[in-house]
Image: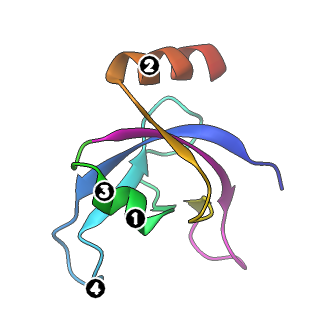
């Protein structure tokens, strides 16, 4: 499976069923739903304020036929990006 770079954003999760209160979702315009979950570094989510934008390497997977999600290894590097950088990247790559 191929990995690509995606722009994602953290948000506060107030629903039940999970101990993770900071979640990550892809920004719209990247060929995938902005509603899918992103599995990535927990420290990335904890070390930056909610609403931070990141560029990270990930792949779309469904792990044995389940619900699709973006997967990025927890130990991979990521880049914090501005809104303008995020918009430019999405426009140029998708």
Give the CA distance from mark 4 to mark 3: 23 Å
Please name whichever residue, 31 or 82, is drawn nearer the observer in this view of the structure: 82
Classify mark 3: residues with Cα within 10 Å, few (<14), some (14-19) or many (20+): few
Element type at mark 3: helix
Front position among marks 1 and 4: 1
Give the CA distance from mark 1 to mark 4: 20 Å
* Whether label 3 touches label 1, CB < 8 Å: yes
Front position among marks 4 and 3: 3
Locate residue 87, reporting x and y percent.
Answer: 43, 19
Element type at mark 4: loop
Quadrant of the rendered structure where residue 34 is?
A: top left
Give the CA distance from mark 2 to mark 1: 22 Å
The answer to whether 92 appears left or right of 41 in the picture is right
First in sequence: mark 2 or mark 1? Answer: 1
Residue drawn at point x = 30 percent, y = 41 percent = 52
Front position among marks 3 and 2: 3
Residue under label 2: 85
Give the CA distance from mark 3 to mark 1: 6 Å
Give the CA distance from mark 2 to mark 4: 34 Å
Q: Is residue 22 above or below residue 31?
A: below
> In the picture, which quadrant includes the C terminus?
top right
Residue under label 3: 47
Locate residue 2, reporting x and y percent.
Answer: 81, 49
Q: Tell me, yes or no, whether the highlighted magenta stretch contains residue 38.
A: no
Q: Is residue 23 visible?
A: no
Q: Is residue 12 visible?
A: yes
Q: Which mark is residue 17?
A: 4
Front position among marks 2 and 4: 2
First in sequence: mark 2 or mark 4? Answer: 4
Quadrant of the rendered structure where residue 32 is?
A: top right
């Amino acid at each position: 499976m191929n990995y690509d770079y995606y722009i994602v954003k953290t948000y506060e999760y107030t629903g039940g069923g999970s101990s993770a209160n900071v979640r990550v979702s892809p920004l719209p315009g990247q060929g995938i739903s902005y509603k899918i979950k992103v599995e990535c570094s927990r420290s990335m989510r904890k070390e930056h304020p909610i609403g931070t934008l990141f560029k990270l390497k990930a792949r779309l997977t469904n792990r044995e036929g389940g619900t699709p999600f973006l997967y990025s290894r927890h130990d991979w590097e990521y880049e914090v990006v501005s809104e303008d950088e995020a918009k430019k990247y999405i426009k140029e790559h998708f």
